């Protein structure tokens, strides 16, 4: 009789401990699935990275636009601030914004003259000598005022300073100088020395570059007189265009009656004089400082009286912002109490 097999005995012909491996087809299928999974992960990561870069680019663009508009608006609000000077009987002057000599700043006691607080150059006007790398067909804005902070007489040197008299016994009612010994005017008590404030002449324009010679990023820049030298300072990168409309007060009530791209005396005497500008409407067109691959900008942007821009059809993102700013100091002097 044949011996019986007990449970656990190996079947005839079986090799103990031998395991079955992958076939070549199974290995290829597994590799293909793995490649597809890795590819999907890479695509998701790349898409997320592109989305994050696009969001950051848009955020920087918006932030720059807000900053540029707020910066110019703040400067415009204090334009024409000349402390306590009363301009009754003044002859307003439109002077060279690049002038550095005291005699060429537009101030005189006899006859009484003073420079306008707001003026500008049209997009097609030649640039003043101190403006370099200006982007073609963009305007220039010139603002004048004094500092809101006072300066001790001993420090009122090199640059131009204004002192306004409040005492009827003083021989003149203002002094413009950079010599400490000239500031002898008094307050209303006719005993204490009146405040001294630095005069500012600031030129805002669009340059074709930020660091010229190294890049071609359009940039809002400012030229002003610092330590007897004209200095150009970049303010905001990516500002591609600037459009300005001036609000003229023709009836003397301190409110703009009409916005114009430039003074036009043919509309009436009130519309041809820079001293009648009581508000400014500003349009700022900004572009991203770097390109976005695969993006094309076909849009046109409304710049008010300057019209619409042509489609750029490039891979920069753009935005436009605008604001109307009241010129508080000249407008306030005209308001009826």
Image (cartoon, grey):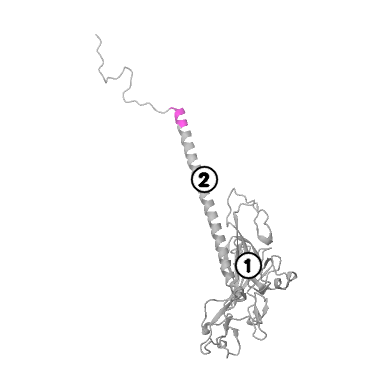
Find out whether the residues at labels 1 and 2 contact each other: C-beta distance under 8 Å.
no
The x and y percentages for residue 230 are 61, 74
Residue 201 in sight: no
Residue 135 covered by magenta stretch: no
Residue 34 in sight: yes
User: At 67% from the left edge and 78% from the top edge, which residue is drawn?
Assistant: 92
Q: Nearer the viewer, residue 311 or 270?
A: 270
The x and y percentages for residue 187 are 53, 86
Mark 1, residue position: 280
The x and y percentages for residue 327 are 60, 71
- Report which quarter residue 127 is drawn in: bottom right
Mark 1 neighbour class, 10 Å CA radius: few under 14, some 14 to 19, many 20 or more? many
In the rendered structure, the answer to whether residue 36 lies left or right of residue 170 reads left
Q: Nearer the viewer, residue 270 or 114?
A: 270
The CA span between labels 1 and 2 is 44 Å
Does the magenta stretch mainly form a helix, a strand or a loop?
helix
Above/below status of 309 relative to 189: above
- Count up the numbered dots: 2
Q: Nearer the viewer, residue 212 or 200?
A: 200
User: At 58% from the left edge and 67% from the top edge, which residue is drawn?
Assistant: 73
User: At 52% from the left edge and 45% from the top edge, which residue is drawn?
Assistant: 47
Q: Earlier in the sequence, mark 1 or mark 2?
A: 2
> What SS does tag 2 mark?
helix
Above/below status of 123 relative to 227: above
The x and y percentages for residue 182 are 57, 87
The residue stretch that appears in magenta: 23-29
* Quarter placement of the N terminus: top left
Mark 2, residue position: 47
Above/below status of 142 relative to 47: below
* Quarter placement of the C terminus: bottom right
């Amino acid at each position: 009789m044949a011996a019986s097999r007990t449970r656990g005995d190996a079947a005839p012909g079986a090799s103990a401990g031998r395991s079955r491996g992958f076939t070549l087809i199974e290995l290829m299928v597994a590799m293909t699935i793995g490649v597809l999974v890795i590819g999907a992960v890479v695509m998701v990561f790349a898409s997320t990275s592109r989305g994050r870069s696009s969001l950051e680019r848009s955020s920087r663009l918006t932030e720059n636009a807000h900053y540029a508009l707020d910066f110019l608006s703040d400067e415009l609000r204090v334009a024409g601030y000349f402390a306590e000077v009363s301009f009754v009987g003044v002859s307003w002057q439109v002077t060279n914004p690049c002038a550095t000599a005291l005699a060429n700043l537009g101030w005189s006691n006899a006859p009484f003259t003073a420079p306008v607080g707001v003026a500008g150059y049209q997009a097609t006007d030649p640039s003043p000598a101190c403006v370099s790398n200006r982007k073609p067909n963009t305007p220039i804005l010139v603002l004048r005022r004094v500092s809101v902070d006072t300066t001790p007489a001993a420090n009122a040197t090199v640059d131009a300073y204004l002192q306004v008299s409040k005492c009827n016994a003083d021989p003149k009612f203002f002094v413009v100088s950079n010599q400490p010994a000239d500031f002898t005017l008094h307050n209303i008590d006719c005993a204490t020395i009146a405040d001294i404030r630095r005069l500012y002449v600031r030129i805002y324009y669009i340059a074709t570059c930020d660091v010229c010679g190294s890049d071609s990023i359009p940039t809002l820049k400012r030229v002003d007189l610092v330590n007897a030298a004209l200095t150009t300072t970049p303010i905001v990168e990516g500002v591609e265009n600037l459009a300005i409309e001036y609000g003229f007060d023709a009836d003397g009530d301190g409110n703009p009656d009409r916005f114009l791209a430039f003074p036009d005396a043919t509309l009436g005497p009130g519309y041809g004089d820079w001293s009648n500008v009581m508000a400014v409407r500003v349009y700022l067109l900004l572009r991203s400082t770097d390109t976005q691959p695969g993006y094309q900008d076909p849009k046109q942007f409304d710049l008010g009286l300057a019209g619409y821009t042509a489609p750029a059809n490039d891979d920069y993102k753009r935005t436009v912002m605008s604001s109307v700013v009241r010129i508080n100091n000249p407008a306030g002097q005209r308001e009826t109490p």
